[in-house]
Amino acid sequence: MEKDVLAVIENSSAGFSKGQRRIAKYILENYDKAAFMTAGRLGVTVGVSESTVVRFAAELGYDGYPGMRKALQEMIRNRLTSVQRIEVAKELIDDSNVLEAVLSADMEKLQKTIEEIDSASFDAAVDAIINAKHVYIVGMRSSTALASFMGYYLNILRDNVYLLHDTAVSEIYEQVLRIGEGDVFIAMSYPRYSTRTVKAMRFVKSAGATTIGLTDGDSSPLVELSDILLYAKSDMVSFLDSLIAPLSLINALIVSIGLRSKDALSDTFKRLETVWSENDVYEHAEH
């Protein structure tokens, strides 16, 4: 099966019925919107029945309409500009109840992540991070917040953790100049994928470091560069990326690493509590 659903449609157009030609024309011209429509919504939009839309997808060789829609979504995830995302959101989100729509979508992504996460890869990532000489973490663009969160807690749990910064084109390479075998490089990237993250990962992999990729699926450019892959579902909400599932995955990694070193973790936090108290880091609770 060809990956590009638009090519599949164009190559099959000769045998289309009148209704199918209308569906095909709309998808080819509005694939960014069609990718997130239900079969019923697409049918209403182009003026055909829902069953015609379902048959159209099946005749193209997909496993029903959901299979075709998934292929469309995979194709366009990294193509949509912020402006296109906003337009798609207008079709998907009921602006009379944005709160419920966004939270429900996030819960769905968490559930899909639970169902599809590979526990062996998760355990391998935990082992690699615990046993690494040095751990380097990078996340750019919207993934910067994820990287900062992970870096903050890993620095509490172990030595030699480095959160890479992207203030200059050359700076990230300078920060990993001495990376090599025995070191772990954790990269996180979700659509639209950061070119700098991909290039940095390619650089450290050639240096012999173990690479861990946190990303959203098989179409990610991190897949071919990762020794260990961890998938968490991400999707767009209007002009921004929903990173709830990736953040939850990072939470699980941190908790698992902490539990593997219980005594050391307790000692670390005892020392931290003393430092925090002596320096008035937190407001004192009233008794």
Image (spheres, rainbow, N blue to C red):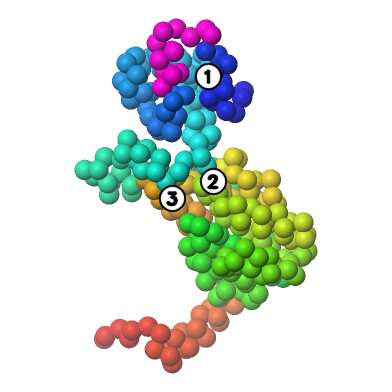
Task: Tell me: residue 236, above or below residue 269.
Answer: above
Left or right, 74 with reference to 29: right
The residue lying at 64 percent from left, 68 percent from top is 171
Q: Earlier in the sequence, mark 3 or mark 2?
A: 2
Of the two numbered discs 3 and 2 in the rendering, the one whose residue sits closer to the viewer? 3
Counting from the top left corner in percent of width and height, residue 238 is at: 37, 45
**Three-letter amino acid code of the residue under disc 2:** Asp
Task: Tell me: residue 48, above or below residue 228.
Answer: above
Residue 9: assigned label: 1
Task: Tell me: residue 39, above or below residue 22.
Answer: below
Real-space CA distance between mark 3 and mark 1, rounded to the nearest whole angstrom: 29 Å
Location of the C terminus by quadrant is bottom left
Magenta segment: does it hold 24? yes
Task: Specify the quadrant of the image occupied by residue 164.
Answer: bottom right
Left or right, 164 with reference to 106: right
Q: How crowded is the residue under tag 3: few (<14 C-alpha within 10 Å), some, or many (20+)?
A: some
Q: Earlier in the sequence, mark 3 or mark 1?
A: 1
Of the two numbered discs 3 and 1 in the rendering, the one whose residue sits closer to the viewer? 1
The residue lying at 54 percent from left, 59 percent from top is 140
For residue 123, say whether it is visible: no
Task: Specify the quadrant of the image occupied by residue 204.
Answer: bottom right
Reading the image, the residue beneath label 2 is 216
Counting from the top left corner in percent of width and height, residue 188 is at: 57, 55
Give the magenta range.
14-26
Residue 241: assigned label: 3
The residue lying at 54 percent from left, 46 percent from top is 216
Q: Earlier in the sequence, mark 1 or mark 2?
A: 1
